[in-house]
Amino acid sequence: MSVREFRVHEWSRHLGRDWRRASAIWTVFLLWAVVAVAEDAVTEIRVFPDRVSLTDRQDKQRLIVQARLHDGRTRDVTGQAQWRLLNRQPARLTQHTLRPMADGTTSLQITYAGQTRSVPVEVKRSAVELPVSFSRDVMPVFLRAGCNRGTCHGASRGQRGFRLSVFGFDPDGDYHRLTREFVGRRINLAVPEESLLLLKATEEVAHGGGERFTVDSEPYQTVLKWLESGAAKDTGEVARPVAVEIYPPEVVLDGGSQRFLVRARYSDGTDRDVTAMTVFSSSNPTAAAITAEGVLNAGKRGESFVLARFDSFSVGVPVIVIPARTDVDWTGVTAHNYIDQRVQAKLKKLRVLPSAVCDDATYLRRVSIDTIGLLPTRAEYHAFLADSGPNKRRRLVERLLQRPEFTDLWVAKWAELLQIDRIKGGFFGWLAKNYNANVGIDQMVRELLTAEGGFFRDPPVQYFRRVGEPTKLAENVAQVFMGTRIQCARCHNHPFDRWTMDDYYSFAAFFAQLGSKRNWEDTRELIVFDKGAGEVRHPQDQRVMPPKLLGGAVPQIQGRDRRAILAEWLTAADNPWFASNLANRIWAQYFGRGIVDPVDDVRVSNPPSNPALLDALSRHLVDYQFDFRRLILDIATSRTYQQSVTYNDSNQHDMANFSHTSFRRLRAEVLHDCLCQVTDSPTRLGGFPLGTRAVQMPVASMTTYFLETFGRSDRETVCTCEVDVEPSLSQALHLINGETTWGKIRRGGLVTRLLAKYEDPRRVLEELYIRCLTRKPTVSEMEDLARLLEPVAAREQVMEEIFWALLNSKEFLFNH
Amino acid sequence: MKNTNRRVGIDLNAIRPMYVRAPVGHWKRQPVLTVFCLLGMGVMAGAVDPDTPAARINYRDHIRPIFAKHCFSCHGTVAGKADLDLTRYSSTLAGGSSGKVLVSEDPAQSRLYLLVTHVEQPNMPRGQPRLPRADLGRIRRWIEEGLRATAMSRPLKGTATRSVLSLDLPAVHRPAGAPHLPRKAALQPAQTTPRSNAVIALAGSPWAPLIAAGRPQQVVFFDAEKRRAIGSVPFSEGLPHLLKFTADGQRLLAAGGSAGVAGRVVVWNVVTGKREVELGEAEDVILAADINPNRTQVVLGDDRFLKVYRLPAAELTATVDRHTDWIFAMAYAPDGSKLAVADRAGGLTVWDTERWVTLETLKGHQGAVTSLVWRRDGRVLASAGEDGTIRLWDVSRGQRVRTWSAHERGVLCIAFGRRGQLVSVGRDHNVCTWDPTGSLLDTLKPAFSDVATRVAFFGEAERVVAGDWTGRLRIWPARETTGQNLFP
């Protein structure tokens, strides 16, 4: 009797009831469709880029035209629009691409569906032929053609002796390896087109990596020109890209295709159309496949994120593909607060209808598990169902948030992230004390990051027990407090994100001046202090890296503790990472999935599924002065959180947009505590008093087979992936045959007590159901089970079996 | 400290007599002359220029003044660091706390000489620049000539086990007849391209003023005296990666090919321009090859395989799979009995060329070995590599006898001269000459503007030709350290 089966029954009833209304909608829809086929109302046309500047003889810029329809869909109308260049002297237009002719200005007029846009065009230095630069022009070729991928020449040993820096983090090294490492082989300056580099890339000669580009392609021509000009090393300052833009910024397709453009801005103020040098990828090729040239083709309904990589930049565009001609009925769907508004706005774009609101009992169970890590008691169940006052769900959440178990749950979560691995020194206690006192998390983090002193007297100092490893500390701070993983940039520029090696080592520099010494009064104690000296060096050229805030500025240090500056920046109200990471982690606790998911892997190529929602949540968290409880109240009382697990046709494939509640297995500690709770049989854990719950355990070493099997965090890393909620065979077997379930049923003696208390076994059944599943048995369940309980002699045994079955049911093991 | 960084502004003439002197045994074989010289020069000792062959370098007149100027402050009677007292002849010979510092007739085993030439550590004089070139030359000659106390003293007898680096090389026999030069009719015009490749194939004729350099599809000959290209022979196989003259200068071997497609080895008769050998079915360019002295065998490196061909049939007789990476260099010993082979991973082996068994595996190079050459007597093998070192190996004992850092970031090519001296080029843009023990003689000027890629001796006077990454070729006239451009 899985939850799913049970719910489907309810759903089919719901369908049958409304045939009359459905047919009315159908009629309206048909009428609308007839009109729509005749003319999709174009509300706006947009031209990208909106101004063009051509600054040397080889410069060029392609343009695209996108139309927005009345319902938010977009179309690529580049081919259908009328193009007119007002003054043909400065530039010429071929295949939607502008190329320079002479210095001057002109304007490009583009007309579609009665709307006209004008694009100013400026041509300068049209006679200047820029020399091909290795770092600016040639390096992007290796990224685009895939030469420097980690599986090819980017591997640490290269391929067949030829290595390129992975994703091009080391242009100087690559220049050396291409031109001088193996003199006479890779390039041929006497006959440039016979350079092995080109012969291999075009597969003119056998190449393990196959054909990377063709002779008539832009990459080939760029490399050839560089060779023809003598394969010179860059001299002086070469303009480097400072920003990369992708157009169009938003795509909603119901079929057809959309071309993308990528433009890079350079440090000398120029810009270039680098579409042909960009690597495109789609996160969901079934919904939206993208070609190497940047043309996206709509596939099946769904969402995708198109990622464009150029140089060390990654930029992306969310793409929505909806079925042609769909509409859904939003009657009765309300928005309780700002959360619902943003979730529903996204769902409307996707033409997805959210599920209905769940019943009171389901809500009670769900919010109790998520908020306090325990099931509602029988008394709570009855009280809540009997409550007929207004806002009873809100009042319930408010009550739960004041429970000490709420604190326990979050302290346990933070203990994982801070990798608390010892009881001595009171780090765990410090955390619990702060939480109980409702100290703002920003203040806690400031205290933590600037901690100084001895391990015993100043508990947060223990966070710096890995004091000698500034890079590790930097990685952890970035992952825990900013939700981004910078580890890749330790050895090479991050392939799917913005982080470069410079960013990495500059960020690590904040922890470079930490020192430690023994306390000579008590030699067990380590004292951590700010040495005021010490630097991090770049491993490639041994440069001293000045502390630079990740994605931020180079701060003024002037004798201050670097960590204090970091902590101030991190917890400032306008820090783009901190609040949104916290909000996302809180959200994930209540939905089993972050808006950015995994919650500690924010990157350009893993964008939030609903940026507006995440933004609103983080803004509210800042406004609430980082009071978790207030944000949780908003979340738990939103309609979105109260949605049923039952899905409809439109939202059954939705995983990321919170259109229905998803099934979530209880995490190890919570499941353990719930088992103890419903069986009245606590486990003694690690020498703590009987009744101490698993979430209250300060360290991971106090464990049981049960906790390990169900994926409790070992706290070996700061990754949220340490907590494993994936079901496994050993979990199922342990529940079925293992000592825990049966042992607890027997030791708790609950069945015996209940049978003694109630004469009617039906009352006992009801109580067990309420305890385990927070609901009464259905009529058919009651009938079936009562029949089994008729023989009085076997009653206790059968009742225990039923209890066992309930504890093994998915409805118990999952939150829903 | 790298040897290459040391600059000693002394004319090559100062040290040159050292090389052209007769072997030490010369004195014993001609007793009459010896007696005459002893009588004559003893009288004139103070007057004779010590750097002429006639001078009898001795402790009292020549060496003690050098020691007095540079060494006495530490190794004097009073201070006597390391118990070494250089103020008296007897105590100098007696040595210091670590034993004797001088071995008669054997500079390569004389610790004093190795330390003052900075071949071994610690460099002497401690904390001072190296001694002037002329002083080093005199110390060396003093040791070689038997450590005379005064001009009238008899030379001391050398030890039985002289270092292989101090051995006298056999007399050179110049082949009879005129040096081999290509006939006019044998050559085609040399082609030039708008831009040059790096010099990757370069060879100097051992007796004629003739230089061969590789270009796409051809091998160009230069007349070093007129300093111009005189013509070319076609190499339609692709790009030559290696050029080598045979010891008599009569034949020229080329290896190379078309990258990723095919590799070939060709041998021409220099005079007629006729191809005498064409072989190799490699699937990529051949970087290393050689022909044995009696022209019965050609070896080549096909990727990591050593392939042996029998002449004149040009049939493949053996394939040796012992190296783990691409074979970068190989060279027959002068008598053809051994073959040294080296690869990109630093592997270096010596083979018996009859039975094809490994005689030695010489370990030490980190990274690719770029160049292998044999000293004329076949006793010493020199190897150079991307680790920046030149290593000298005593092949009969399988031992490394000297290692030094020659060019920062990598040595790309070396060549042995007839007197056991070496010339080398590397990534530091320099061309350096070294004496037989590995002591820096000169850094030839001017340095190249880019990586110096290949070097060779040419002609009877053993002049130096070298090329660089930009395609420039430069030659150094005899007895001068300042070079002239050959091309462009």
Image (cartoon, rainbow, N blue to C red):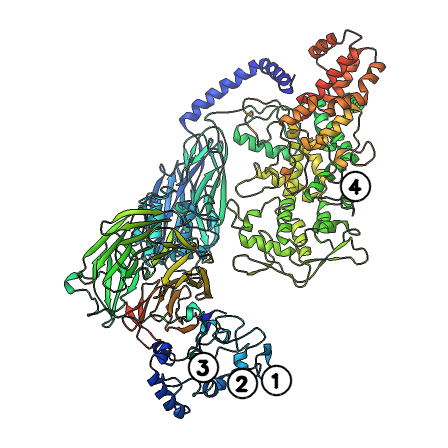
In this rendering, position of residue A33 left or right of residue A731 = left
Image position of A248 with respect to A748: above or below: below
Residue at mark 3? B135
For the residues labelled 2 and 3, say whether their Cβ atoms are less than 8 Å apart.
Answer: no
The picture quadrant where one finds residue A659 is top right
The answer to whether residue B261 shows anywhere in this view is: no
Query: Looking at the image, is mark 2 or mark 1 earlier in the sequence?
Result: 1
Type of amino acid under label 3: Asp
A309 or A398, nearer to the observer: A309
Q: Quadrant of the C terminus of chain A?
A: top right
Type of amino acid under label 4: Asn
Around disc 4, counting alpha carbons within 10 Å, would you say few (fewer than 14), some (14 to 19), or many (20 or more)?
Answer: some
Image position of A677 with respect to B249: above or below: above
Question: Label 1 is found on which chain of the structure?
Answer: B
For the residues labelled 3 and 1, say whether their Cβ atoms are less than 8 Å apart.
Answer: no
Q: Are marks 3 and 1 on the same chain?
A: yes
Q: Quadrant of the N terminus of chain A?
A: top right
Q: Are marks 2 and 4 on the same chain?
A: no
Name the element at disc 1. loop
How far is the residue under mark 2 from the one under mark 1? 12 Å
Mark toward the viewer: 2 or 4: 2
Type of amino acid under label 2: Arg
For the residues labelled 4 and 1, say whether their Cβ atoms are less than 8 Å apart.
Answer: no
Q: Which mark is residue B78?
A: 1
